[in-house]
Image (tube, helix red, strand yellow):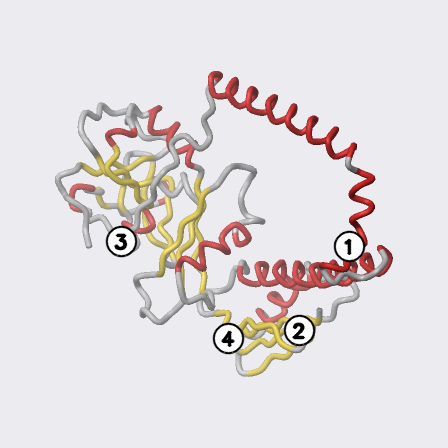
């Protein structure tokens, strides 16, 4: 699947010169505008990967309002779960387009350089200052002085992929008129809440009388003490589940070496088990150390290593 080539393709970088655009164009975003990772995940569908992205990028991104995207690596078999995952800020891209005199009305599609240039075999010069090439499957932007031999990039020969993003044009923009409307709504809500508060206060006695009936109807314990004990039980369960999600996200976000893969991640018998394959001697200790940094003192981590397979087991 390709996009109509009648639209001109422009490369958008922070230092790109302003242009005069009077017709629709396709935009390829410079690596300087987004964050990208290449991960192997035990997740079958891309839609499920996207749910994990806020946690995966949690410790990487500076403060901001991000959207996320992901797709399977096209250079690996379809049954292999290797993904390219992205984080980007809509407002910064929209502001940059405006700065370069490119109206959103004239933008036909927006793509990452990663999805459009991942098959580059040489280093290409974008301008006299910046060049682009592929390292370990990731499209990288570097100063041109770092590259000894470069070719000139011709974007007109680029066939765009199906991987594109849609920017939220108004998600981060609120004008004064909108602020006034929001304030008016909040004032109305405040009066409604105050009115509800006074009505509730008058019915306190009635609520107290209905308490026993409510407890009986919903099969609750007869005393608040017993119900609080039940609540504490569920809080403990929730705390354990929160830890499980935290550790799972941390393991999925680990930066592994090129030939290393997370081959198993499962929760069994109150333990979170992770297997890493392709781990060279010495790297097993590095992976173990990264995981130990998030464990509390009373949590045990069991480790075994054999035939380049690292087995880690966290007791929860």
Residue 204 against residue 297 in the figure, above or below: above
The residue pinned by badge 1 equals 213
Q: Secondary structure at mark 4?
A: strand
Q: Secondary structure at mark 1?
A: helix
Q: Nearer the viewer, mark 3 or mark 2?
A: 2
Label located before the other in sequence (1 or 2): 1
Q: Is residue 227 left or right of residue 196?
A: right
On the image, numbered disc 3 is attached to which residue?
Answer: 120
Residue 277 disc label: 4
Confirm or deny contact between disc 1 and disc 2 (CB under 8 A): no
Q: Residues within 10 Å of mark 1 (few under 14, many from 20)?
A: few
183 vs 163, nearest the viewer:
183
Nearer-N-terminus badge (4/2): 2
Residue sticking out furthest to the bottom: 307
Give the side of residue 314 with respect to residue 25, left or right: right
> In the rendered view, would you say 2 is above or below 202?
below
Quarter of the image with the N terminus in it: bottom left
Which numbered disc, 3 or 2, marks the residue that appears first in the sequence?
3
Picture quadrant where residue 50 is located: bottom left
- Tell me which corner region of the image, top left, top right, bottom left or bottom right, holds residue 118: bottom left
Q: Earlier in the sequence, mark 3 or mark 1?
A: 3
x 82%, y 57%: residue: 228
Q: Earlier in the sequence, mark 4 or mark 1?
A: 1
Q: Residues within 10 Å of mark 2 (few under 14, many from 20)?
A: some
Residue 20: horizontal and vertical position, in percent? 22, 23
């Amino acid at each position: 699947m390709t996009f109509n080539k009648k639209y001109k393709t422009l490369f958008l970088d922070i230092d790109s010169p302003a242009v005069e655009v009077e017709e629709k164009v396709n935009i390829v975003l410079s690596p300087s505008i987004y964050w990208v990772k290449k991960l192997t995940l035990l997740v079958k569908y891309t839609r499920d990967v996207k749910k994990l992205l806020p946690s995966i990028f949690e410790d990487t991104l500076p403060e901001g309002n991000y959207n996320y995207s992901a797709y399977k690596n096209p250079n690996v078999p379809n049954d292999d779960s290797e993904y390219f995952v992205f984080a980007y800020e809509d407002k910064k891209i929209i502001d940059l387009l405006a700065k370069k005199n490119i109206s959103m009305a004239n933008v036909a599609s927006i793509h990452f350089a990663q999805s459009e240039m991942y098959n580059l075999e040489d280093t290409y010069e974008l301008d006299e200052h910046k060049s682009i090439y592929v390292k370990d499957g990731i499209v990288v932007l570097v100063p041109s002085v770092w590259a000894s031999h470069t070719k000139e990039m011709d974007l007109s020969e680029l066939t765009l992929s199906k991987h594109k993003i849609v920017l939220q044009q108004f998600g981060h923009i609120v004008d004064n008129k909108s602020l006034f409307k929001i304030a008016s709504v909040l004032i109305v809500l405040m009066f409604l809440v105050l009115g509800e508060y006074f009505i509730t206060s008058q019915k306190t006695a009635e609520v107290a009388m209905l308490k026993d009936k409510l407890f009986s109807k919903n099969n609750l314990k007869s005393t608040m003490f017993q119900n609080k004990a039940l609540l504490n039980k569920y809080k403990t369960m929730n705390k354990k589940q929160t830890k499980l999600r935290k550790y799972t996200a941390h393991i999925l976000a680990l930066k592994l070496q090129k030939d290393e893969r997370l081959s198993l991640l499962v929760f069994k018998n109150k333990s979170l088990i992770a297997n890493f394959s392709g781990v060279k001697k010495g790297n097993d200790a590095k992976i173990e150390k990264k995981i130990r940094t998030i464990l509390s003192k009373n949590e045990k981590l069991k480790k075994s290593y054999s035939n380049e397979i690292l087995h880690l087991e966290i007791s929860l």
